[in-house]
Amino acid sequence: MSAYFSFFGDNAALLLELTLGHILLAVLALVVAVVLAVPLGAWIGHLHRFSFLVVNVGNVLRSLPTLAIIAIGIALYGFGVINITVALVILGFPLVLTNTFTAVEGVDPGTVEAARGMGMTGWQILSRVELPSAIPLISSGIRTSWVYIVATAYLATFAGSQGTLGDIISNVEGYNLSGVLAAATISILLAFLGDALLGLAERALTPTGLQLLAQRTPATATEPIPAAA
């Protein structure tokens, strides 16, 4: 254990540099996944079509091993940051897509009909009614995607991209078990920290009415049911 704790002090500069690179790679992949998945999932959910396609595409992409995607990427576009970024985007994309589609499609039909009766266009209904109501579930998909991406970003080393915590995790001979454990610990902390920050962002973006409803629901569920006379 002493070697484990000593590694943080003896290699602080290296850990800081690799941690920043790890964060940048994970953020890049997450942003690309969100930019691709949220508009697509929201539009499909708004149309209430192609649910079979969304579910099956999500399941297929989720089942692909990241290392296999990296290997295929080496054959297609070689080593480097593009390779690992594409692999991480494919890892995170299905989670965000499925959650976005499910959240938008599950918005109360009565609310949508009321908005349509007020003269709102399809785009206005999607942007002003459905998406704000779907924020909690969309955020849940993004948070889960972040955990998966940041925990897998160490595979950048195998894709020929240096500058992440994978440089240590994949080099047991050079950094010993203490170094691998230290880098893995930082990766786990990044997952928890990112999840917490995204949770705060979700709270800030969620409409007040939905927050109040979420706070009341547990209390309502625990109220005793009066006995029959």
Image (tube, rainbow, N blue to C red):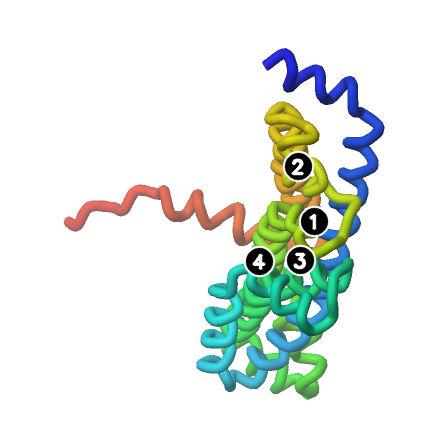
Q: Position of residue 9 (x, y in %)?
A: 77, 18
Q: How many marks?
A: 4
Distance from the alpha carbon under mark 2 to that under mark 1 = 10 Å
Local packing at callout 2 (Cα closer than 10 Å; few below 14, some 14-19, many 20+) is: some
> What's under tag 2, amino acid-wise?
Asn
Single out the mark in the foreground, 3 or 4: 4
> What's under tag 4, amino acid-wise?
Leu
Q: Position of residue 151 (x, y in %)?
A: 61, 46
Mark sitting on residue 171: 2
Residue drawn at 74 percent across, 61 percent down = 79
Distance from the alpha carbon under mark 3 to that under mark 2 = 47 Å
Above or below residue 153? Residue 113 is below
Q: Which residue is mark 1?
A: 157
Single out the mark in the foreground, 3 or 2: 2
Tell me the element at label 1.
helix
Q: Which residue is mark 4?
A: 67
> Which numbered disc, 1 or 4, marks the residue that appears first in the sequence?
4
- 27 on left or right of 66: right
Distance from the alpha carbon under mark 1 to that under mark 4 = 11 Å
- 9 on left or right of 43: right
Above or below residue 70? Residue 128 is below
Residue drawn at 46 percent across, 69 percent down = 59
> What's under tag 1, amino acid-wise?
Thr
> Which numbered disc, 3 or 4, marks the residue that appears first in the sequence?
4
